[in-house]
Amino acid sequence: MARTNDDPLDAGHAAGLVVDAEGTVLSCTPAAEALLNRTARDLRGLRVPDLLADPGSWRTVMAQQDGPVWEGRAELAPDGGGDVLFRVLPLDDGRDAGDARQFLVLAAPRALVAQWRQGHAFMRELFLQERVGLAVLDKELRLVRTNTPLLPYTGIPADLYGARLTDFLRESDARAIDARLREVLTTGAPLVSVDVEVHTQVDPGTGRILALSAFRLQGTDGGVAGVTAMFLDVTEQRLSRRRLDLLHRATAALSANLSAEETTRDLVEVLVPGLADVAVVDVAEAVFTFEEPGSEHDPGDSLRRVAAAGGSPGLLDAGAGVDPVASPYGMSAWLRARGLLLGRIQVGRGEGRPPFAPEDLALLDEIASRAALVVDNARRYNRERSAAISLQRSLLPSPTTDTVAVHTASVYLPTDTANGVSGDWFDVIPLSSARVALVVGDVVGHGLQATATMARLRTAVRTLADLDLEPDELLTHLDDLVSQFVIEAGEATRTPGAETAYGSFGATCLYVTYDPVTRRCLAASAGHPPPALVAPDGTVGYLDVSPGPPLGVGGLPFEPVETEVADGSVLALYTDGLIERRGHADLDLGMAALGNALSAAVALGRPLEEAGPEVVRQLVPGPLSDDVTLLLARTRAVPGRDTAAWTFAADPSVVAEARERVLEQLSRWGLDELAFTTELVASELVTNAIRYAGGPLELRLIRAASLICEVSDRSSTQPRMRRAQASEEGGRGLFLIAQLTDRWGSRYTRYGKTIWTEQALPPPS
C-alpha cells in the first residue's frame, strides 16, 4: 500500500496553480478555487501579482527564490487566501528545470503549514527520546512502531516490528499490560499513569515499575487504528514511596500502645513482608525490670527475643556490631535512645527477593530509632505506672473486712484501667468501743496527681479518725486541710496576681460512724452523695444527709445526721461514677437505679462479695466515664447481754460499789481472769472522774472482740499521762492503765468525754 503524505504543501492537499513563465494562470485545482475564493474561469488568464494583497510586493515575493524548486511566503488578498506559504515546482516536459516554461505553484494557509510542521517535529523527537518508552500497536496489539529503545533493559529485542509483548516480557506481566491496552481499544477511555511491573524473559531479575499511559488511535476513516502506549520508569520513585509508606505504617504500629512486647510484635508484622521475609526484635532485659539499660558505648545487658515474624531466622546474617549493618540478604540496626542501648532489629530476605539496597538500611535505621524511643518511653511509663499502682494499692484497704461492728466488701474500678489509679478512695477504720468509721471520697481528676491528693486526704482522715472526732467536726478539719493544700500549691506555682486553682485538690467526702452497741449511725457529707441503707426486709432508702460544700471551699458548716440501724442492714457508700449516666445530668435517676439494684443484689442475705460486683455490672454495663467505688457494709449489733452500764454520782464512796459491779459482771461473763486488772482500771477511771470532772458519771463494760471498759463524764478536759515524781502520792493512774491494758484513749462526746480501755479476751477453754 502506497504511503500517504499529509503535508499541507503536498500536491494531494494544497491549492495548485499552473502558471507560465510570465506568471499567468493557466489552470487550477478545486483546492485553489476554495483557497482563493474564485472560480477556475475567473482565475484563468490572471497574473499571479494580481492575486497578492499588494501587487507591488511581487518583487519581494520573487526575491525568495533560491533554486529551481523553492518555497516562500506571500500575503494574498484578505478574501482570497490571506497569509500563505507556497512551493514552486517547474514542470519538466523534457527540458532542463531552468528552461521550464510552466510551473506548478502549491499554496496553503501559513497557520496550517506551521501546525503540521510542529506536529511532525514533535512526533519525530518523541520517537527519538529515550526517557519515555513509546509504542504504537495495531488492533491486534502487535508493535508497529517504537522509540529506540522502547525499554532500556536487558532482554528487549532490537527489532520489535510485528512483535507482541508476550514475545519478550514475562507472560504474567505481558498479559496484564495487554488487558489494559485492550480495554483502551474497546472503550476509547484513555489510561493515565497506571503502575505495572515489567520483567523480561531473558533477565527476570528484580524487574522495573513502569507508569503506563495509553490512548486509542483513529484512522482517516474514523475507525479504530490501534493504540499508543507510553512507559515511564518510576521504579525509584515508587520504591521511595513504598519505603515512606512502610515508615508511616511502622510509626503507626509503634504508636499503638506503651507495651514493649506488643509494640515490637506489631512492628515485625509491618516489616514482613513490607521490607523483608523475616524480622526479629531483641530487647534488653533491663527494659522489663524498668531499670536503666547499658549505654550505647558500654552495652552489657542480655537481650530477650520479644518478637519474630516471617521465615527462618537463619536468613539473618547481618553483623552484630553497634552500627547499622547490611549484607546482601540481611540487615540489623540497634535500638538506641537517650544514650541507652535498648535492643536490636534484624531482618532478612530469601533468594526470591532482590538484595537490600543502601536506602533499605537507612530506612531500617530510621525505624529502629523510632522504635527505640517507643521502647524507652514504654519502660519509663511502666516504671511510673508500677510505682503509681503500688502507691494506690498500699493506700487502699483490703477489699473485705470483718469487725465486731460490720462486715464489708468493696468494688473499686478506676477509669484508667491501664494504670489502675484514680482519685476515688474508701476506708474502713476501727474506732474505740467497738465502733467503726466508713469513708468514701472522690478527688477531682484521674491519674497520678489525683492519686497523690487522695493519699494525702486518706492519711489525714485516718489521723483525724484516731482522735475520735464526730463526723461533722472531722470534715471541718479536713476542709481546713484541703484549703491549706490549695494555698500551698498556689504559692508554689502561680504567677503574681493570678488566682489559686481549686481543681487540683478539690474533693468530696462522706464520713459515717456506726456504733454496734447503740445501733446508731452518724453521717456527714462534704459535697458527696448520701449513703443508701438497705433494711433487712430489702427496702432501700437514703440517709437524709445534707451534702455540704466540697472540701476546700470553706465557710459553710457540715451537718451530721443520726439514724438507728437495724441489725443486718446494709450501708452502701459510693462515688458519683456509679450513679451518673452518659447524657443525663439528673442524679436522682441514677440513685433510683442504685436503690433497685441494691434491693435485688443483697436480698436474702446474699454475700456482699457477690452483691457488690452485681450492682456495678447492672449500673455500669459499658466503658467507664468516671471512677467507680462501692463500699457495702452489713451491720452487726452487740447483744444487750454483752454490755453493762452503771451511773454513779460524784462521790468517792461509789468507787467501791463500782469495783463490785465490775467483778460481778465479769463473773457472769466467765471472765474472772480479767477481774483483777479490770477492777483496778475501773477504780482508777472512776476515781479520776470524781476528782477532776464531777458527776454524774457512767461506767460501761462491753464484751465484744475485746473487753472494753469506759468511763464517761461531763468534763471536756482530756486526761494526760505523765511520769510522777518519787515524792508524789498521785499521778500514776493513767500510767498504770497504759501498762495493764492493750489500748486506751479518750474521745470527746456531745456532753463531755469518754475514757476507754481495751483488753484481749482470754482464749476459749
Image (tube, rainbow, N blue to C red):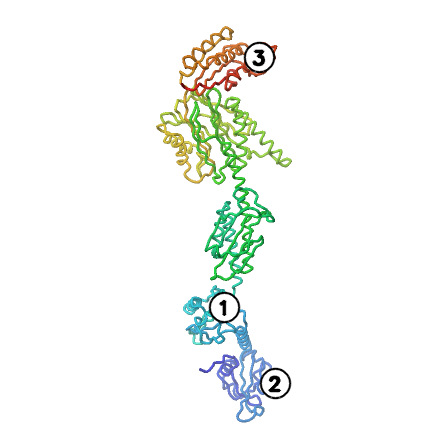
Q: What residue sits right under mark 3 in the picture?
A: 731
238 or 669, nearer to the observer: 669
Q: Is residue 154 above or below residue 345?
A: below
Q: What residue sits right under mark 1 in the picture?
A: 231
Amino acid tagged 2: Asp
Q: Earlier in the sequence, mark 2 or mark 3?
A: 2
Q: Is residue 379 above or below residue 217?
A: above
Q: From the viewer's perspective, is 532 left or right of 733?
A: left
Q: What residue sits right under mark 2 in the picture?
A: 66
Indicate the position of residue 79 as horizontal and vertical percent values.
54, 78
Dot 3 surroundings within 10 Å: few (below 14), some, or many (20 or more)? some
Which corner quadrant of the image does residue 593 belong to? top left
Viewport quadrant of the N terminus? bottom left
Nearer mark to the viewer, of 1 and 2 = 1
481 or 686, nearer to the observer: 686
Dot 1 surroundings within 10 Å: few (below 14), some, or many (20 or more)? many
Judged from the image, the secondary structure of the residue bearing numbered disc 2 is loop
The answer to whether one can see residue 350 in this image is: yes
Indicate the position of residue 492 as horizontal and vertical percent values.
62, 34
Amino acid tagged 3: Gly
556 or 423, nearer to the observer: 423
